[in-house]
């Protein structure tokens, strides 16, 4: 999945696949996780958020099923 670099302390890259509603996040410690069934609006809000790590913790973190891929 293509990821876009973002300006954040804890998150370095974000990718989204609309057809499968899969959000992929690479964290600064190197871990990459995919989150499933994520509506496109959540992705859009994450990308617009000035505090991406806060948005992640309150709106994504444990709310969507995920799989660590690296």
Image: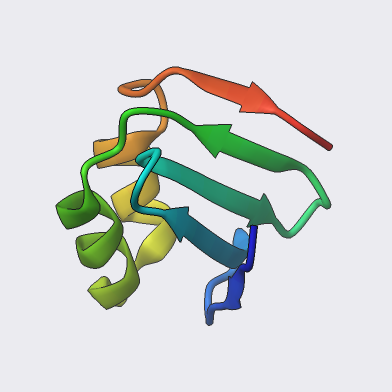
Q: How many marks are shown on the rendered structure?
A: 0
Tell me what residue is drawn at x 34 percent, y 37 percent.
Answer: 60
Residue 22 shown left or right of residue 59 in the figure: right
Res 61 → quadrant:
top left
Q: Quadrant of the C terminus?
A: top right
Tell me what residue is drawn at x 80 percent, y 51 percent.
Answer: 29
Q: Nearer the viewer, residue 52 or 69?
A: 69
Residue 45 shown left or right of residue 22 in the figure: left
Q: Quadrant of the N terminus?
A: bottom right
Tell me what residue is drawn at x 57 percent, y 76 percent.
Answer: 4
**Percent x, y for residue 69?**
77, 33
**Percent x, y for residue 67?**
63, 23
Q: Nearer the viewer, residue 48 or 2?
A: 2
**Residue farthest along the front direction in this orientation:** 19
**Percent x, y for residue 42?**
22, 51
- 14 shown above or below 67: below
Q: Nearer the viewer, residue 69 or 7?
A: 69
């Amino acid at each position: 999945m293509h990821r876009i670099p973002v300006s954040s302390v804890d998150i370095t890259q974000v990718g989204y696949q609309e057809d499968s509603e899969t959000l992929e996040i690479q964290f600064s410690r190197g871990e990459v996780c995919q989150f499933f069934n994520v509506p496109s609006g959540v992705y859009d809000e994450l990308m617009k958020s000035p505090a991406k790590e806060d948005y992640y913790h309150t709106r994504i973190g444990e709310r969507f099923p995920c799989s660590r891929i690296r």
